[in-house]
Every structure is written in C-alpha cells, then in structure tokens.
Amino acid sequence: MTLQLLFDALSLGGIYAVAALGIALIFGVMKLVNFAHGQFIAFAVFALIVPSTDAVAVMGLGAAPAPILVPAILLVGAALAVLAEIFVFRPLRNASPVALMVASFALGVVIQNLLLVGYGGRPKALSLWPELGSPVQIAGASVPLLQVIVIGAVLAVLAALALMLRHTRIGLEMRAAAEDFGMARLLGVRANAVISGAFALSGALAAAVALVLVAQTGVADVRMGGQIMLVAFIATVVGGMGSLGGAVAAGFALGAASVALQALLPAEARPFRDAFLYALVILVLLLRPQGLFAAASAKPRV
Amino acid sequence: MPKLGVFDLSVRYGKLTALRDVSFHVAEGARLFISGPNGAGKSSLLGAIAGEVRAAHGRIEMDGDILSGRVPEAIARRGLSMVPEGRRIFRALSVQENLMVGVGLRRDRSSVPDDLATIYEAFPILGDRRHTNAGALSGGQQQMLAIGRALMTNPKLMLVDEPSLGLAPKVVDEVYERLCALQALRGLTLVIVEQSSARAARVGGRMIVLRGGRIVADGDAAAFAEHDLLKEAYFGEGAAA
C-alpha cells in the first residue's frame, strides 16, 4: 500500500517536474513565463494521430515503433517551440515582460484553435503502448509497468538535462545567460542560439510529458495541456522562478502532496483535494514568497 | 589606422543625454585612461563601444570596421572584450566555468588550455579556487576573475571599467601590475576607466577626462597628476576646451 503510494507520488511528481522544467528553462534565459507550454503539450499529443474530426482516433506517427516514435515526437515538440520563438517571441524580444506573457497566452489560444480545426473538439480515445498497462511485482507491491517506465524515463530526462547543462558548451552558455544575459553576450555568447536552444529543450520536454499523458490516460483532448500547465507553473513559482532544481523539487513535492492528500483525506473531503493542495501552496508562498529555492539572479532579459 | 576610433558619439537615455559628440582614438597597443566625475558618461561610453548601449548618433570603428549598430556578441567576436562596471561575474558558476564562457567565440580552440594556464599563472588564487563558486570569491578575486574572463576571449582591445572600485589600494596595485604584464604579453590595446589620476600616472598612459558627457581634457596621465589639471577639469575652471 505505502509502496504503491510512493510509486504514484514519484510518477505524478515526475510529470509535474518535467513540465515545470520546460517552463523554468525559458524563464531562466528570457524571463518569459510561457503560458503556451500547455498547448505545446497538447500539440505533441495530437501529432501522434492523423488529423480528422472523426470521433475515432487513427494513429499516424503514434503507430510507429517506440525507437522511432519517441525521438520523432520530441523533435516535433522542439520544432514547434523553436518556430514559436522565431515568429512570435523574437520580434518581441525588447518588449516588456507583460507583452511577452500576453503573447504567450495568445499563442496558446492560436495553437488550441488550430487543433480544434484539425481534430474537432471531442476528446478521442487512443491507445499508446497498451502492453505497458500490465502490472509488475516490486517488493510485494503490484505496480503498473507503465509507472515504472515513467519514473525511469523522468529520471533519465533529468539526468540528461543536468549533464547537458553542466558539461556542454551550450549548457554553460545557457547557465551564464540565465544569470546575466547581457554579460554573456559581451563575452560573445549568441543570444539567438541560447534562446533557440532553451526553446528547443523546452519543447522536447513538453513532448515527453505528452507521451506520458497519452500512455497513462489513453485520451487526446485539446484542453489536456491546460491543467498540467497550471500545476507546472505553480511548481516553478514554488520552486523559485528561474531555479531549475527548484522547479524539479517543487514538481515532485506537488505530486507527492497530491497523492498523499488523496490517500489521507477522509472520503467526504477528497473531492476537494485540489483546494487543500493549493492551500498548501499558498502557505508555502506566505512563508517563502521568493520560492523554496530562489534563483541566483533575476536580472532583466537581453 | 587607430585600433579604436570614436567619432561624434552621442548617447541618450530618453531625454537625458549621457554623451554628446565625443570623438577620440586609441593607437594599437596603447593604454587610454578615461576619468571624470560620477555621471560624466564613462560607463555609457564603454557600453556604447561594446554594443550594450545604443548610440543616438555617431560612429565607432575598430580596425576601420564600423562597430556601431552591431549586437554585443558580434562586437566581441571582432576581438573586443569588456570588464564591466560591477564586474558582473557569474556567481552560480565555478571560477573555471566563468573563464570558459567567452571561449565559444574563438577559432583557435587549441590554445585555450595554454591561455587558461597563463591566467592561473598571473592570478594564482584563481587557479587554487578554480572549482569554487565564483560568488564565494572576495571583491579583489572577483575583479581578477572578471579580467581573466575577458582575456580568455583572446581580445585585441579590452575595455576595463573601474578596476579599482571597492578594492584596497594594495590589491589595486596588484591588479594593475598583472593587467599591464598581460597587456605587454598579448599586445593588447587597453581602455581603462580610472577615477584616480595619480593611479593612472603611476601606471602610465594617455588620459581623457569626461564631464557632463563631453571630453574636457586630453593628455598624458602623468601631466594631469602633476599639474592637477584634473581638478580643474572636474570643476570646470578653465580646463574645458
């Protein structure tokens, strides 16, 4: 029972953590809260199926074997994010942060409506990797194989990102730019390369979340990115805006708190679980308004 | 051809004019000090040359190439490097990572390890603390790091904004000594913002004095210190050209 809860907490928290990282990465270099991130996730979900307004989903890219499907969908997410950067955010780079934020809202609405046109508004059932639903026995507990894979994938993504930030040139440039973009540019760091790189990573992370969501829920819904975007955004705020480690930690914490509340609340209070969860968030922010892990700096972007 | 040429440069922030019609040039391998009271436009001048501050009008040239209008990273790639006001080191990065940020623009990557060794030789404390977070360094060490970081781009022209600010006089001596040694070693052209004419005279070089966004005096740093011309320039008692 408790082991099952642990796996629930880790897999849910892991999804929140990866989604929050996608937001924190862009915030780190551009001081932009990208509210279109949820629609990036939804776009990657629908990229799996053939566009049509029929109720039945026909797998397109989703029918490909995993070794092709996974990199391809990550690439779709990255490409969408880079295009958004070039056509929406680059022309606005010297605009106020508020203008950028509003632009990201607008971009989200545009993507959502494109999906509505292409796929219709009804949620569609689709089955990605159904064989992963079978349970496996771990230390006496029965855990869905998918959950184990999700946790493993999340840890792999986090490790790969950490290694990239620490040991590659673009990673070093991103960390420098997150702290003081102007100074990084004075040292020859190309603003466009760093920002495009951050968007590409963020888009790939959105696509990874999309894959996990589809595999877990078996549903493609135009609105599915919104809910997770909200939680992920809260995680970045609780973690301390711009702190990547903070976003990950807060993502896991929100997942764990959510699972714990679900298990511990009396049955009649469970429908109000989210109210309790967000009350906790408010409490944390009252105690630490700068977030649990304040960022190294919050200098204005470029 | 001068290494750096500035022609009729003006910088404005809204209605405030920080620099008006400033012109000067610096010969290759030379050392130029810029002095003047707070708010005279010294940092704006360096910022405009490095591309961080937009010029309202005028022209900046390096080796005859026009720099004005280019983005900072493009100017850095032409061989200009800056030790900015307030040092602006990357506090969350290690000392060595700070030094490596500017290496990305170099075509001669193979000489990077040698250059790193040179920096550690000039500033042994940086070598000792290469894996420390730069935010944990003292003010003097951060100044050395900012200089080392600027040198790691292998610049031909380096702008240094107030290397002495907030440092003990003994540390300032040390910083200048290393800076001049490295200049000789690399054939660097240096432009240094320095408040103290006595200090500039001791180090040696040409000096221009800014006041109210204009150049009000230009000459040998030693002459300023001797004749106390600087004081006149500051307070505007006849030194203004």
Image: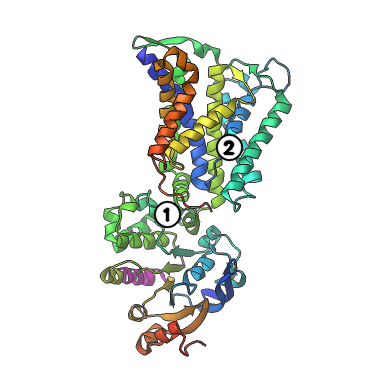
Please say whether residue A14 is visible from this viewpoint: no
Using the rendered view, name the quadrant where residue A238 is placed: top left
Q: Pick the quarter of the image with the N terminus of chain A.
A: top left
Residue at 50% x, 87% y is: B240
Magenta span: predominant SS is helix
Indicate the chain on which mark 2 is placed.
Answer: A
Badge number at residue A35: 2
Please report the bounds of the magenta region as a residue range. B175-187
The kind of residue tagged 1 is Ser
The kind of residue tagged 2 is Phe
Q: Relative to residue B198, is residue A153 depicted above or below?
A: above
Badge number at residue B110: 1
Residue at 42% x, 68% y is: B160
Residue at 55% x, 13% y is: A130
Counting labels gives 2
Residue sitting farthest toward the front: A268
Indicate the chain on which mark 1 is placed.
Answer: B
